Image: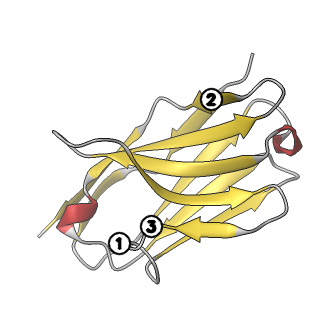
Amino acid sequence: QVQLVESGGGLVQAGGSLKLSCSASINIFNFNAMGWYRQAPGKQRELVASILDIGNTNYADSVKGRFAISKDDIKNMVYLHMSSLKPEDTAVYYCAADRSDPNVRYWGQGTQVTVSS
């Protein structure tokens, strides 16, 4: 059974930094892509950043230049480095992983990030 476990969330002041980590229970080579999503209260879950198995990355416009996604294929980890945090970055952040054949998306349980002004 695939499990994704996030860690690293917390409370930070505006302008600060946080690093989120996602640990996968299986080799992440099994996934076509991995990513970070977030959901703020009363809002839909949105993609923050994604990384393909070949390493290509994609970011939401709202985080470009401030966030960076990376992965460690040996440790089966995916990271989200967040800097210049803003109060509007406050949300629950979820790690996700996509497999094909069949198409399945796995989710972590989420980690809270709160940015105070």
Extreme-top residue of the structure: 1
Cβ atoms under marks 1 and 3 closer than 8 Å: yes
Extreme-left residue of the structure: 117
Instruction: Say which residue label 2 marks.
Output: 106
Q: Please tell me whether mark 1 sits on a helix, a strand or a loop.
A: loop
Determine crowd level at label 3: few under 14, some 14-19, many 20+ residues with C-alpha closer than 10 A.
few
Compared to residue 72, the image places residue 57 above or below, namely below
Residue visible at 81% across and 49% down in the picture:
75
Compared to residue 27, the image places residue 71 above or below, namely below
Q: Where is residue 77 in the image (x, y as percent from the top left)?
A: 72, 49
Three-letter code, disc 1? Ser
Which numbered mark, 3 or 2, is in the foreground of this view? Answer: 3
Distance from label 2 to label 1 (Cα)? 24 Å
Determine crowd level at label 2: few under 14, some 14-19, many 20+ residues with C-alpha closer than 10 A.
some
Three-letter code, disc 2? Tyr
Q: Position of residue 54 (x, y in %)?
A: 85, 62
- Mark number displayed over residue 60: 3
Q: Position of residue 61 (x, y in %)?
A: 41, 73
Three-letter code, disc 3? Ala
Quarter of the image for residue 13 reads bottom left
Q: Please tell me whether mark 2 sits on a helix, a strand or a loop.
A: strand
**Left or right of 94 on screen, residue 116:** left
- Mark number displayed over residue 62: 1
Extreme-bottom residue of the structure: 65
Q: Nearer the viewer, residue 103 or 111?
A: 103
Residue visible at 47% across and 29% down in the picture:
109
Residue visible at 79% across and 41% down in the picture:
31
Mark earlier in primary sequence (2, 1): 1
Distance from label 1 to label 3 (Cα)? 5 Å
